Image: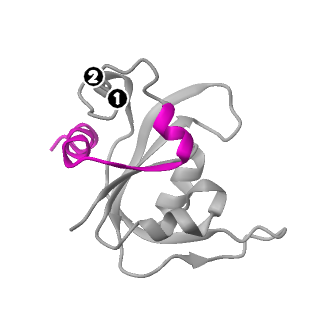
Amino acid sequence: MSRNWIAVASADHVRTGRSGGFMQVCHGKAAPLKRIRPGDSVVYYSPAEAMGSKTRLQAFTAIGVVKPGEPYQVDMGAGFQPFRRDVCWFDAREISILPLLAQLEFSAGKKNWGYPFRFGLFQISDHDMQIITSAMMPE
C-alpha cells in the first residue's frame, strides 16, 4: 500500500532535484528517506524561494512518485555527502498553499498550520494528496 508524503525544501533546491530526477530531505539525512518506499507519492512544499531567504513563497513546488530502489549517497564536494531517492516528477505547476489550507486535513482549522513542516518530511492522507494533485495538475 503506497503512502503520501510532504517534503520540505526551498524552491531552488526542489528545482535542482526535479531536473536531476531525485529528492533529498532534512539536509541530506538517510533516515527520513528510508521511511519512504517505491510507489509512494511525494509533494514538495517550499516555504521560501531560496534557503535562508526571509521572503515567503509558501508553495507546493513539485509532485511525483518514488522510483524503485533504495536511498543512495552522493558526493557533492566539500565533505557534503547527502542521501537521495529517485523520483519520477510530474509535469505540474507550482501553487500557493494558502487557498488550500481550509481543505487539507492536516491544516484545516489550525492557526499553527505550518508546524508539521518543521520536521522536513511528514505523511499525509489520500484526501490531502488528491486536493494537492488536483490543484497542481488541473487536467
Asked whether 38 or 49 is in front, the reply is 38
Q: What kind of secondary structure does the magenta stretch mostly adopt?
A: helix
Q: CA distance from mark 1 to mark 2?
A: 7 Å
Q: How many marks?
A: 2
**Residue underneath mark 1:** 107
Instruction: Look at the numbered disc 1 and give the secondary structure of its residue.
Output: loop
Report the residue that reaches farthest toward the bottom: 69
48 drawn magenta = no
Q: Residue 77: x percent and y percent?
A: 79, 71
125 drawn magenta = yes
Residue 4 vertical position relative to residue 88 in the rendered view, above or below: above
**Residue underneath mark 2:** 102
With 139 as the anchor, is 110 left or right in this view? right
Q: Residue at x 52, y 60 (%)?
A: 17
Q: Are marks 1 and 2 in contact (CB under 8 Å)?
A: yes
With 50 as the anchor, is 24 left or right in this view? left
Q: Residue 87: x percent and y percent?
A: 40, 67
Q: Which residues are magenta?
A: 115-139
Q: Residue at x 39, y 39 (%)?
A: 94
**Neighbour tally class for label 2: few under 14, some 14-19, many 20 plus, Cα within 10 Å:** some
Quadrant location of residue 107?
top left
Q: Residue at x 67, y 41 (%)?
A: 51
Q: Is residue 23 visible?
A: no
Q: Residue 132: x percent and y percent?
A: 27, 40
Sequence-first disc among 1 and 2: 2
Tell me the kind of residue under disc 1: Ser
